[in-house]
Amino acid sequence: MLQHAVDLNCDMGESFGAYRLGRDEEILKYVTSANIACGFHAGDPGTMRKTVALALKHGTEIGAHPGLPDLAGFGRREMQITPQEAYDICVYQIGALWSFVRSEGGKMQHVKPHGALYNMAAKSRELSGAIAEAVYKVDPELILFGLAGSELIQAGKRIGLRTASEVFADRTYQQDGSLTSRRLPDSLITDDEQAVRQVIRMVKESKVLSQQEIDIPIEAQTVCIHGDGSHALEFARDIRESLEKTGISVIAAKAVAR
């Protein structure tokens, strides 16, 4: 493995019906993995098909991005679901995207839960186990993306999946390794230079400074950037260039997952 290498992923395919969100085609030039919404929190069949085709055109690896059934809340509101329900909605959504990828002549690389489902699974052994089982039973060759150090990563390893520990460029961290809730102040990093510095340190030093001003250890195999911000395209370009200038190779998750 290269001394310093990381995957760069972005959530995509989040348009729905008449509503358009993100600049997917332009951002695909700079990322190595695309997490494509599967219709529950965002996206629709036509958007899924088009986004898959765009990712294949650009040579970007494709992953399913299953979320809670909450279009109005963009999948960011917690719901009381059982592990069985988590399993079912993940199998359903992974299968839907898998069909589009297969029909377009591609192969799916990974699965990354979205929003509240992702954050709930990061802390819950039961939910994370159900999601990992869903991924494994659909295709044990798929890579499971999860928050670095979380229950989701552990669940993937227990069941026999390769996992990619994910860090976030534009989010702040708490001293337990969790992301700062979007409901709290300063949960987002809006200064692009600060975000880039945070990522480079996470990749090269395996550390991140928490909001409590404490360095915490962190493993960075894939970096998430968000495609729906006002400067998303510029940030995608800048972070790709900055990583490479500091000697960090930007490569697809399949080359760095464990």
Image: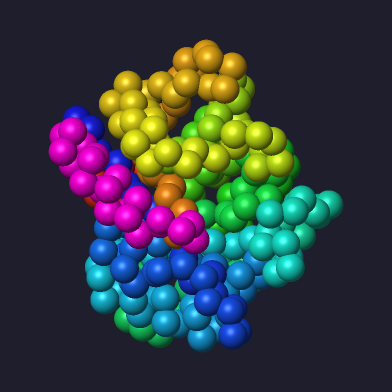
What residue range appears in magenta?
Answer: 228-249
**Residue 145 drawn in magenta:** no
**Residue 249 visible here:** no
Q: Which colour scheme is used?
A: rainbow
Which image quarter: residue 86? bottom right
- The image position of residue 123, as x and y in percent, is 68, 35
Q: Which of 253 and 175 is in front in this view?
A: 175
Q: Residue at x 52, y 13 (%)?
A: 214
Q: Is residue 59 above or below residue 219?
A: below
| Prevailing SS of the magenta stretch | helix
Residue at 45% from the left image edge and 82% from the top image edge: 49
Q: Is residue 80 above or below residue 200?
A: below
Quadrant hosting residue 175: top right
- Residue nearest the viewer, comparing 55 with 21: 21
Where in the figure is residue 78, as x and y percent of width and height?
77, 51
Image quadrant where one finds the N terminus: top left
Q: In this view, does 2 lie to the left or right of 60?
A: left
Quick check: is 237 in the magenta stretch?
Answer: yes
Residue 250 image offset from top left, x and y in percent: 24, 46
**Residue 47's x, y, as percent?**
50, 80
Residue most toward the right? 80
Residue 256 in view of the camera: yes
Q: In this view, does 37 lie to the left or right of 103?
A: right
Residue 234 sits in which quadrant?
A: bottom left
Count numbered badges in the picture: 0
- 35 w.r.t. 215: above or below: below
Q: Which residue is drawn at 42% across and 82% down?
A: 50
Which residue is pictured at 69% across the width and 54% down the height?
Answer: 76
Quadrant of image for the C terminus: top left
